[in-house]
Image (cartoon, helix red, strand yellow):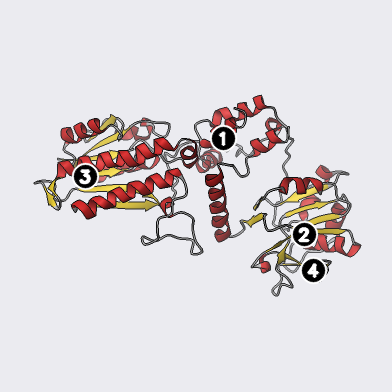
Amino acid sequence: MKHILVTGGAGFIGANFVPYFIENNSEYHLVNLDLLTYAGNLENVSEVENHSRYTFVQGDICDRNFIEELFQKYQFHDVIHFAAESHVDNSISGPEAFIKTNVLGTFNLLDSARKLWMSAPNQYNAGFENSRFHHVSTDEVYGTLGETGLFEETTPYAPNSPYSASKAGSDMIVRSYFHTYGMNVVTTNCSNNYGPKQHNEKLIPTIIRKAISGENIPIYGDGKALGCKFEYAVQENPNGLAEAFIIGKAFIGNDKVALILGDNIFYGTGLAELLQENSNPNGGIVYAYHVHDPERYGVVEFDNSGKVLSIEEKPTHPKSNFAVPGIYFYDNQVVEIAANIKPSHRGELEITDVNKVYLEQGNLKVSILDRGTAWLDTGTFQSLMQAGQFVQVIEERQGLKIGAIEEAAYKMGFISSDQLKKLAEPLLKSGYGKHLMSLVS
């Protein structure tokens, strides 16, 4: 019987692979090597723990002597290498572990396999002529997605984080063993995955688990932990943005109100201060942002002096390249205005029609967001991917977090340092929790 080494087989992806391989390859005995860090859990492979063709070994791929002894003991015919440090946020705060595990660990496995399988370059020892080393990598080695929204095998490597750089380094070592020694190696650069046995802290498993059990899907509750008060209302049908003021009439009461679209991302120096300055409007306050595809948005037209001439909703032939992004401030009359506008040809109560009423009254202020501000509308698949890449690059390059609501609450003085620590403690296994804790350390 042949022996195969699978590293990282107690993690999310490895633990899905191990039972599948055992069931479908009766000629193999599988040895699962895993260090059992926070990402590894033996319960993930409990269905095969007593199988006659399965052995679990706890150990570190960075320990060269241990790895060589393991290869000598089991005479592995093949290797499938899943094990890796893979949390991007953790690689920013502690890159050394990623270099050791992903580069040195891969080298230890690769070189130990070469010594067992080969006597010289391009010369395999008897019984190992068909041995293969399968290195499981990531598509993050290619860097940021371009306009095509996909990578190919010929895409140049451009890693942007210590994690992806360490994986790129391990890929290059594996590649060199093919060209230098003629070793049978395969590298697969996989995209992100989700599915059974994924770590419970991940978003998709949490949402699915709650939905199946009929529990409330966690958002941010009532906001008390953040020093805020959150209330929720349901728009039963997609009747347009302006319906928010009708649904939220009781919530608004006699106050002024802001409307922010959940699929919009704003980022830029001084943006928070600008919004706070405009939070007490007499009339309406909206913003204008230069885009190359204005037909997707509400469009504002200016004359040469900067005076607003018109606002149109998703026009076929836009009169300018200035779109109105999804953040609006209004005085209390917006409730009555929204209740009296008519549905558009799309059957919706358009926010642009609300703005038109304020414009006709002479009570609409429009400010152009400067070029240092980034506005991302994630309303299409392509724009969602672009937004994800933007956030990743900013966070990896600057070590900052975009959209960290706990951090915002702390810096606004809504919560104390002790309250922030309490929010961070359940998240310490992730880079996000460590980031929050660093704010008060």
Determine which residue is flagged by label 4: 302
Q: Nearer the viewer, residue 2 or 160?
A: 160
Mark closest to the chain's N terminus, 3 or 4:
3
The 10 Å Cα crowd at callout 3, few under 14, some 14 to 19, many 20 or more, is many
Q: Residue furthest right?
A: 361
Q: Quadrant of the C terminus?
A: top right
SS under mark 2: helix
Q: Which mark is residue 435?
A: 1
Residue 252, percent across and down?
A: 83, 44
User: From mark 3 to mark 4, how far is it between C-alphas?
Assistant: 67 Å
The 10 Å Cα crowd at callout 4, few under 14, some 14 to 19, many 20 or more, is some
Q: Which mark is residue 78?
A: 3
Residue 392, percent across and down?
A: 53, 48
Q: In the shown orientation, is residue 333 left or right of residue 140?
A: right
Residue at the spot 76% in from the left edge and 50% down from the top edge: 259
Q: Quadrant of the N terminus?
A: top left
Looking at the rendered image, the disc whose residue lies closer to the viewer, 2 or 1, is 1
Looking at the rendered image, the disc whose residue lies closer to the viewer, 3 or 2, is 3
Residue 65 visible in image? yes
